[in-house]
Structure formats: C-alpha cells, structure tokens
Image (spheres, grey):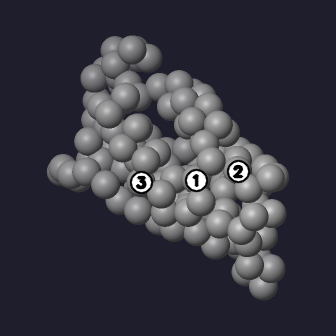
Amino acid sequence: MDQVFIKGLSVEAVIGVYDWERTILQPLVLDLDLGWDIRAAAAGDDLSATLDYAAVSQRVLEYVGTSQFQLVESLAERLAALIMEEFSVPWLRLRVTKPGAVSEASGGVGVLIERGVRTA
C-alpha cells in the first residue's frame, strides 16, 4: 500500500490530567502515515484523485486545536477515527508526541497507534 505522510505537524491544545494542565495550551507534534493508492493521481497528475495532505493537515489542526482531552490516548483514538471517516483512509499510523511532559525524555513522550486494514 502506498502512503501519504505528514511529519512534525505542530499544534497547541489543552491536554492533560492535572488541574494546571487544564488551564494552558501545550504543544503536541503529530506524525501521520496514511494508506492511499496514489496510482490514479500519478497517472493523471490530478490532485482530486489523491489524498490532499494540505486538507488533512488543516482538519487535524482544527480538531486538535479545539480539543480538550485529558489523555493523549483518547486524542489519538478520536483523531484516527475522524481522519478515516472524513477522508476515507483505509489505514493509518498516528504518532502523538507531547514534548516536555517528561523532562528527561528529550524526544518527548506519547503514543503510536495503527488503525484500519493495510492492503498490498
């Protein structure tokens, strides 16, 4: 399966379980690998036949930026479902990183999920 990817998408959101986290915006970094057959788009050089990563990115930024989840896990699950439904993506891998949540983890902490069916 081909993939369209979006790496390092940065957004700020209310995220966290502690009282102080519920009153501030915190940075999140999202990486998405989206299963998509790109052959039709490539054959016709046609944007309408591919997965528009600009549109996906904008929708993700809007959704996450207005969300108020406590757990990164909840955000990842709901975001994966939204992307698959709204963009007809059959498979995705989503990494949500919360930089600074653990000061000793210089690369951040978070979750990595895969949803859907990956075809050949």
Question: Residue drawn at (64%, 37%), measured in percent from left and top?
Answer: 66
Q: Amino acid at mark 1?
A: Phe
Please tell me whether mark 2 or mark 3 is closer to you in this view: 2
Q: Which residue ends up furthest to the front in the rendered image?
A: 19
Q: Which residue is mark 1?
A: 69
Residue 73's place in the image compared with 4, above or below, is below
Camera-nearest residue between 106 and 24: 24
Q: Which residue is mark 3?
A: 77
Contact? badges 1 and 2 (CB < 8 Å): yes
Q: Which residue is mark 2?
A: 14
Q: Picture quarter containing residue 54?
A: top right
Question: Residue drawn at (80%, 53%), measured in percent from left and top?
Answer: 23
Q: Earlier in the sequence, mark 2 or mark 3?
A: 2
Q: Position of residue 30 (x, y in %)?
A: 59, 52
The residue carrying pointer 2 sits among few (fewer than 14), some (14 to 19) or many (20 or more) residues within 10 Å by Cα, namely many
Q: Secondary structure at mark 2?
A: loop
Residue 46's place in the image compared with 106, above or below, is above
